[in-house]
Amino acid sequence: MLAQRVTPLLLLLSLSACEQLSNALDLPDPQKTAALAEAEGKAIGGACRHAGRSLEDCYALNAKAQKAAIFAGWREMNDYMTQNNLPTVPSQVAHPQAPTPAAAMPAAVAASATADAGTAAAPAEDRTAKRPRAVP
C-alpha cells in the first residue's frame, strides 16, 4: 500500500529533474534556442524602428537574425509609436560601415583624397571650356 503511494511520487520527482540534468550537462534545447532567436529578432526589429531605421537597413545590419522576427518586432514598435505619437530617436553612435567624414580621416589620407578629387575634376572643366557654344 505504501509502495503504491510512493512510486508515483518518485516518478514525478525523477521527471522534474530531467530539465535540471540537461541544464547541468549543457545539452542544447532546440525549443529554447528557437524562442531565444525569436525574442532577439523582435528586440532588434523594435530597436531599429525606434531608431528610425528602415526594414532593409535593419536586415542588412543584422544578417544573422531571423527576418520574420525582425519584421514582427519592427511592426509592433511601429504600431506602439503610432498609437502614442512617439518620435524616433536617432542613433548617436556612428555605424562601422558608414563612410568616415573628412574631418575624422588622418591628414595624409585627407590630403590625397582632395588631391585626387582636384585632378579628376580638372579634365571635366577643360572639356566644357573647349566646347564651342551653339549660336541661335
Image: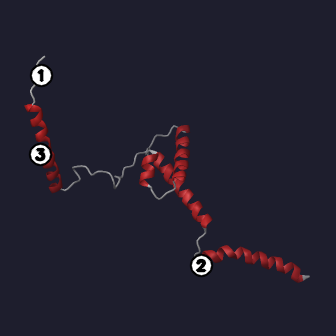
Relative to 31, is 126 above or below? Answer: above
For disc 1, the neighbor class at 10 Å (few under 14, some 14 to 19, many from 20) is few
> Where is mark 3, residue-wise?
119
Lower position in the chain sequence, tag 1 or tag 3? 3
The amino acid on which the numbered mark 1 sits, given as a three-letter code, is Ala
Q: Are marks 3 and 2 in contact (CB under 8 Å)?
A: no
The amino acid on which the numbered mark 3 sits, given as a three-letter code, is Thr
> Where is mark 2, residue-wise?
25
What is the spatial separation of the Cα atoms under label 2 and label 1, in whole angstroms? 85 Å
> Where is mark 1, residue-wise?
134
At 65% from the left and 75% from the top, the residue drawn is: 20
At 57% from the left and 64% from the top, the residue drawn is: 33
Instruction: Give the label, 1 or 3, closer to the camera.
Output: 1
Q: In the figure, is residue 90 to the left or right of 41?
A: left
**Count of marks, rendered view:** 3
For disc 2, the neighbor class at 10 Å (few under 14, some 14 to 19, many from 20) is few
What is the spatial separation of the Cα atoms under label 1 and label 3, in whole angstroms? 28 Å
What is the spatial separation of the Cα atoms under label 3 and label 2, in whole angstroms? 66 Å
Residue 38 picture quarter: bottom right
